[in-house]
Image (cartoon, rainbow, N blue to C red):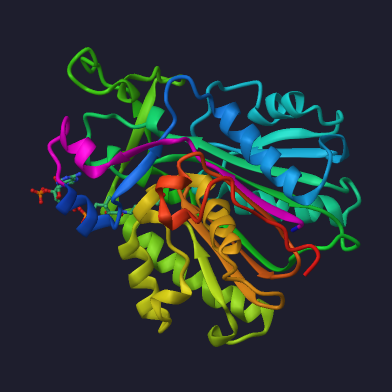
Amino acid sequence: MVAVASALPALRISNADVETFLDTSDEWIASRTGIRERRIAGPEVSLLDLAARAARAALGAAGWEAAEIDTVICSSSSPDETFPSLACRLQAELGCPHGPAFDIQAACSGALYGLGLAQSLIQTGLSRRVLIVSAEVFSRLVDWSDRSTAVLFGDGAGAFLVGGPDEEGSQIIAIDLGADGSGAHTLGTLPAPEIDLADRRPPYTRSARALGRVVSMNGREVFRFSTRILEQLVLRLAESAGVGLEGIRLVVPHQANSRILATAAGRLGLPMDRFASNVERLGNTSSASVPLALAEVAAKGELENGDLACLVAFGAGLTWGGVMLRWGPTAVAVDDPAAESDPGSGGPDMVREEAEE
Ligand code: UT7
């Protein structure tokens, strides 16, 4: 992994903002999920805009040209259209050569499925330099009259650049991907109900739903799956990497709910400070969540060369994915227009180049 980057929309929507039009409370949302605010892409921001910003941030940090990318892989569970793929749109937007470009659908595990695929494509010689972008606008996929799902999600994008063993970067030393389709009914989409959106709700709740469907989730069942699979993935990846849990510097998990992280941490006997967490500020950004969290901790300098970072994700499908990284000189960029007013994000357009270290 040569680079990791992220891009966020500027609009910050707090729990108090949501309280103004939904029967919910900051107290309920924060205590049950850890979420205090989320970012929302306003109507003028497209999914492609977010994806392109994350991709350009990664390319800029690594010093790669778009012309050097021979494969583009995107993941999104909130696409604007069924086809053409976001990856084809992004390839044209960036001006990448005409190698393969395709989307993968693995819900919140998409970025890690993408890393696994990129590694295989490079190992088999089909690709040399792969761009993976996970971009989500769940604000356009939730039913803003359903308090049990609307408060959970946020928008954002993350990108990885992956090259061959001759490139500087972090080493992918173990991969664990899987799915159990028998759990498909627990988290999916339903036809959007007829809602009178001409009421007093803010404009971002009125975005056209491209695919005409909204998120539906059995929260308790998904919670049980999430805590179990997170624990199992960390244990399996540690075993594959031949290390004990104490050898993992940071677990970088999918950010769905801080209680999921706390439960898994408790079962693993790991302190919470070994878990990267930004769910408080960004909510659940589906497949963008792991690259967003990794870019953030890396930009803050929380990973040093040689450290093991354990990336784990889980989501609809049901799917899961894990990647153990041995951190090395990796280019990092965070494109966050709202960072100046957000002390947790460490400054605007923060770019940390580690290549010379
Ligand atoms: O990204 C993919 C992976 N996703 C996940 O891993 C999510 C997993 N699930 C969860 O994080 C949690 O199950 C939720 C946060 C979704 C829900 O938390 P919960 O503690 O399981 O709540 P619940 O669904 O059992 O609901 C408890 C109560 C209900 O009221 P009653 O029936 O007990 O009177 C809900 O109607 O909380 C009510 N409720 C709310 N109240 C205020 C549900 N949503 C809200 C809300 N505000 N936003």
Which residue is at a point 61% across and 71% down the rendered structure image? 303
Is 113 positioned to the left or the right of 60 in the image?
Answer: left
Q: Is residue 96 among the parts visible in the rendering?
A: yes
Which residue is at a point 72% across and 24% down the rendered structure image? 93
Is 42 positioned to the left or the right of 131 in the image?
Answer: left
Which residue is at a point 46% across and 66% down the rendered structure image? 230
Q: Is residue 85 above or below residue 294?
A: above
* Among the 4 quarters of the image, the one containing residue 262: bottom left
Residue 153's spot in the image, x, y percent?
37, 42
Residue 311's spot in the image, x, y percent?
57, 64
Q: Is residue 153 among the parts visible in the rendering?
A: no
Is 280 positioned to the left or the right of 309 in the image?
Answer: left
Residue 228's spot in the image, x, y percent?
40, 68
On the rendered image, what quadrant is the C terminus found in? Answer: bottom right
Q: Which residues are magenta?
A: 2-25
Q: Which residue is more in the foreground, 239 or 153?
A: 153
Q: Is residue 14 magenta?
A: yes
| Tally of marks | 0
Q: Which residue is more in the foreground, 236 or 4?
A: 4
Q: Is residue 352 magenta?
A: no
Q: Which residue is more in the foreground, 276 or 9?
A: 9
